[in-house]
Image: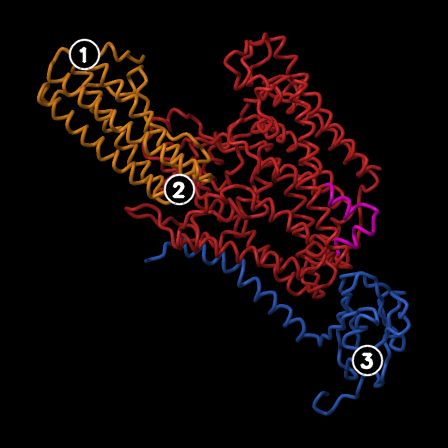
């Protein structure tokens, strides 16, 4: 374990299986019906969700299609399957921004292109530079969780929230360019983006030299076959998944058929030292913190917290918001800072800025946060998934029985094994975190030099001597210990929460 | 196998110089269209640079015809080993963080102009043809001027940011 | 601009997924309600509204569907003892259906059959059954 080029000691970091080598996969991704068809399917589901939310009113949500599909099915599938397996796979068919995008393009599935380029309706303003980061998404997602007592239990609250997001997406599409809503505002987009660094799939170019010699970047500016990257990226330079929305537009526009959809080992993007930033670090803190707070409120034994989250009293609700925010925005980042400071001291790496070390190591929280959410999702799935059979037959609580399952009784399953399943997730997550922490320690303190090579410390002072391989390795090991301790203690805390 | 540009004869060197100017002009035009929806000022810079590259290209082409007629060579810039890389914008998340956009674009242009200037100075030293030497020196001076202007814009941008 | 066949197909799919779904669901429910007279009753604890409506009307010999929805976070029940119909438990958020055909006129009390609150004993309503008029026969 802890090899530079292998994950958990056996998965080569640079292993790839190109799925688009199979003609049917390539044909699927190059077709303009992809992702239109998944979008239409989701539009249908969303229509039913919105109807169920509206007609459900303030009734409890367990027998409501909207509540069940959004907060049980979708959330669980997102965390357990879509993000770790498909990167931003949800974004492929997300119905939230599509109405705005169709209005921009004035077409559903075709391409409007003329001599000046792709056609877009709207003001096409530039997103403000100061807001061109993840901070809005961080705060919006956190703010959304303030309403967790309502939106996950009252159908009308889910209706209002989803309706507001769709309306906002439409307005932003008419004011700003392309997928500004997805890139800078959508609460779901932020954490998907960060956690997609851990995913086992990616979109990359097949042969970079083709792009180098190729002048007209159709993937960026668009052509008759498709639109320039709606996510405002340069597809020919992708190094990580964070902002690629998996719309596959670049597959359609690339005149050299040079885009590939690959299977890869988990977490490879976490090792890409490119554009790592504080807003992404805070996203990692917030996601970890929310998973803990959600467990405490929803699955913990403390009724007082439930009352607070449900706004039984104003004082309680304000306390909930305050504690929740403080924990996520200040406590976790501050504690982590302490461990990173200690790591830097142990490694004797004064030439590495504390900020750089802090940001680099914050990416070790991605696997930790993801497995915490997966463990939490088991706590939703196993007790509650039987409700899904009911709501499929009677989505609007009108007494229907479309598929004969409307009277299926509430049936929790495997709940006895749930703590062990959750514990297993957390322990596997810990192993992954430790592995990536060691690799990131090597990157931070030895400039990424593999074991056995001489090390010139990153940003070394002019008079600094070159470290021997042994000295480099010792530096990495010493710097790794405090981070490993933080990760282990965090996992232990999560284990105590989940299994008692 | 790539050839060392020191091995090029004057005809080949002039042929490659024409191709480089045309290639860079097309690339700058492409940059202009890439930035079209994001940064008007950067678009104008690249359009200007593209226009100048086209002009240089035409000038070199006319000198080539004067010296060598309509003879065509099977030689492209990619065949030459020395660093005359095509200007490439490689910052993948460029447009998302718009603070980087103009800087990255200007730096790409700056690198390309520096390489072109060094290339022409080298050619000026090697050639025995007085007229060609004068042309290469003029082109080197023009690329020098481009580099200075881009450097000034980069400094202005850094001060404003 | 002349639309291509793909655009037509795309529009049909989008409209089917959205507008048609909405109107289709509403039409189906109205059709069901027309086939069998449906009365919606919402159950809440007495302090939160009791049965709503607390009085419902029916006609002798006419089939009737009572659609009882529990809008609270505690379980309720429902029974009309004199007519021998009831539901043991309506869970929070759940909808239960009783279909019956009253065979005699009168005022029949319906009540909650699950201890739901301190005021449980006052959680009652009335089903008023009248003889069919000549027009209704």
Q: Tell me if residue A279 is in the magenta stretch.
A: no
How would you classify the magenta stretch by its main secondary structure?
A: helix
- Residue pointed to by mark 1: B9
Element carrying mark 1: loop
Marks 2/3 in contact by CB < 8 Å: the verdict is no
Residue A496 in the image, given as x and y percentages of width and height? 81, 35
Q: Which mark is residue A54?
A: none
Q: Which mark is residue C127?
A: 3
Q: Is residue A135 left or right of residue A333?
A: left
Q: Is residue A85 above or below residue C74?
A: above
Q: Is residue A176 left or right of residue C32?
A: left
What's the colour of chain C in the image?
Answer: blue
Report the magenta residues as a range.
A292-310
Residue C46 in the image, given as x and y percentages of width and height? 84, 72
Residue C33 in the image, given as x and y percentages of width and height? 67, 73
Counting other residues with Cα less than 10 Å from the Cα at mark 2, is it few (<14), some (14-19), or many (20 or more)?
many
**Which chain has been coloured red in this picture?**
A
Element carrying mark 2: loop
- Residue pointed to by mark 2: A228
């Amino acid at each position: 374990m802890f090899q530079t080029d292998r994950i958990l000691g056996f998965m080569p970091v640079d292993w790839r299986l190109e799925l688009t080598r199979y003609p049917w996969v390539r044909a699927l991704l190059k077709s303009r019906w992809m992702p239109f068809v998944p979008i239409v399917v989701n539009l249908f589901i969303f229509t039913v969700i919105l109807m169920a939310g509206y007609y459900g009113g303030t009734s409890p949500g367990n027998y409501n299609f909207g509540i069940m599909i959004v907060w049980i099915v979708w959330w669980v599938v997102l965390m357990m399957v879509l993000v770790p397996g498909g990167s931003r796979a949800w974004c492929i068919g997300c119905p939230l921004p599509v109405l705005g995008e169709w209005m921009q393009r004035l077409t559903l599935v075709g391409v409007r292109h003329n001599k000046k380029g792709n056609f877009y309706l709207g003001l096409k303003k530039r997103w403000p530079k100061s807001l061109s980061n993840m901070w809005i998404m961080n705060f919006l997602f956190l703010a959304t969780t303030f309403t967790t007592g309502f939106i996950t239990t009252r159908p009308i609250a889910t209706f209002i929230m989803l309706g507001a997001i769709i309306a906002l997406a439409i307005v932003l599409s008419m004011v700003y360019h392309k997928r500004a809503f997805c890139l800078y505002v959508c609460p779901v987009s932020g954490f998907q983006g960060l956690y997609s660094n851990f995913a086992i799939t990616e979109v990359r170019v097949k042969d970079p030299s083709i792009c180098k010699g190729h002048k007209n970047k159709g993937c960026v500016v668009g052509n008759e076959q498709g639109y320039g990257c709606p996510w405002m990226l340069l597809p020919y330079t992708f190094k990580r998944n964070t902002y690629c929305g998996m719309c596959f537009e670049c597959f359609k526009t690339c005149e050299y058929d040079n885009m590939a959809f690959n299977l890869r080992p988990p977490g490879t993007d976490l090792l890409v030292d490119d554009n790592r930033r504080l807003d992404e670090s805070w996203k990692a803190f917030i996601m970890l913190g929310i998973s803990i707070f959600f467990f405490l409120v929803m699955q913990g034994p403390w009724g007082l917290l439930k009352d607070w989250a449900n706004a039984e009293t104003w004082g309680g609700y304000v306390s909930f918001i305050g504690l929740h925010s403080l924990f996520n925005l200040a406590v976790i980042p501050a504690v982590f800072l302490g461990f990173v400071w200690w790591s830097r001291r142990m490694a004797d790496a004064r030439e590495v800025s504390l900020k750089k070390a802090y940001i680099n190591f914050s990416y070790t929280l991605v696997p930790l946060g993801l497995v915490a959410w997966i463990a939490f999702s088991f706590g939703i799935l196993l007790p509650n998934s039987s409700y899904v059979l009911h709501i499929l037959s009677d989505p609007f609580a009108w007494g229907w029985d479309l598929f004969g399952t409307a009277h299926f009784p509430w049936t929790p399953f495997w709940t006895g094994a749930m703590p062990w399943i959750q514990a297993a997730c957390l322990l596997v997550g810990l192993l992954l975190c430790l592995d990536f922490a060691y690799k990131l320690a090597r990157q931070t303190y030895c400039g990424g030099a593999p074991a056995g090579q001489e090390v010139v410390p990153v940003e070394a002072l002019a008079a600094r001597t070159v470290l021997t391989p042994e000295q480099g390795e010792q530096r990495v090991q010493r710097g790794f210990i405090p981070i490993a301790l933080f990760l282990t203690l965090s996992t232990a805390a999560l284990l105590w929460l989940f299994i008692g | 196998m790539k050839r060392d540009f020191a091995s090029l004869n004057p005809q080949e060197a002039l042929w490659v110089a024409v191709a480089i100017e045309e290639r860079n002009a097309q690339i700058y035009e492409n940059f202009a269209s890439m930035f079209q929806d994001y940064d008007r000022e950067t678009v104008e810079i690249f359009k200007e640079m593209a226009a100048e590259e086209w002009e240089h290209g035409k000038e070199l082409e006319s000198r080539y015809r004067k010296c060598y007629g309509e003879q065509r060579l099977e030689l492209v810039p990619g065949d030459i080993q020395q660093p005359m890389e095509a200007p490439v914008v490689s910052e993948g998340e460029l447009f998302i963080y718009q603070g980087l956009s103009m800087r990255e674009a200007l730096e790409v242009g700056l690198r390309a102009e520096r390489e072109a200037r060094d290339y022409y100075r080298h050619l000026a030293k090697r050639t025995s043809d007085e007229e060609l030497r004068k042309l290469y020196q003029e082109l080197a001076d023009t690329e020098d001027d481009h580099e200075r202007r881009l450097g000034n814009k980069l400094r202005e941008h850094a001060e404003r940011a | 601009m002349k639309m291509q066949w793909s655009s037509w197909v795309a529009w049909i799919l989008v409209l089917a997924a959205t507008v048609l779904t909405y109107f289709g669901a509403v039409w189906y429910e109205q059709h069901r309600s027309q086939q069998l007279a449906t009365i919606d009753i919402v159950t809440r604890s007495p302090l939160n509204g009791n049965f709503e409506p607390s009085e419902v009307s029916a006609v002798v010999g006419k089939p009737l569907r009572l659609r009882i929805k529990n809008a609270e976070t505690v379980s309720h029940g429902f029974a009309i003892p004199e007519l021998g119909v009831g539901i043991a438990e309506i869970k929070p958020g759940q909808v239960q259906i009783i279909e019956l055909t009253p065979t005699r006129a009168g005022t029949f009390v319906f009540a909650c059959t699950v201890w739901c609150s301190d005021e449980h004993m006052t959680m009652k309503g009335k089903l008023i059954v009248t003889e069919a008029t000549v027009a209704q026969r």
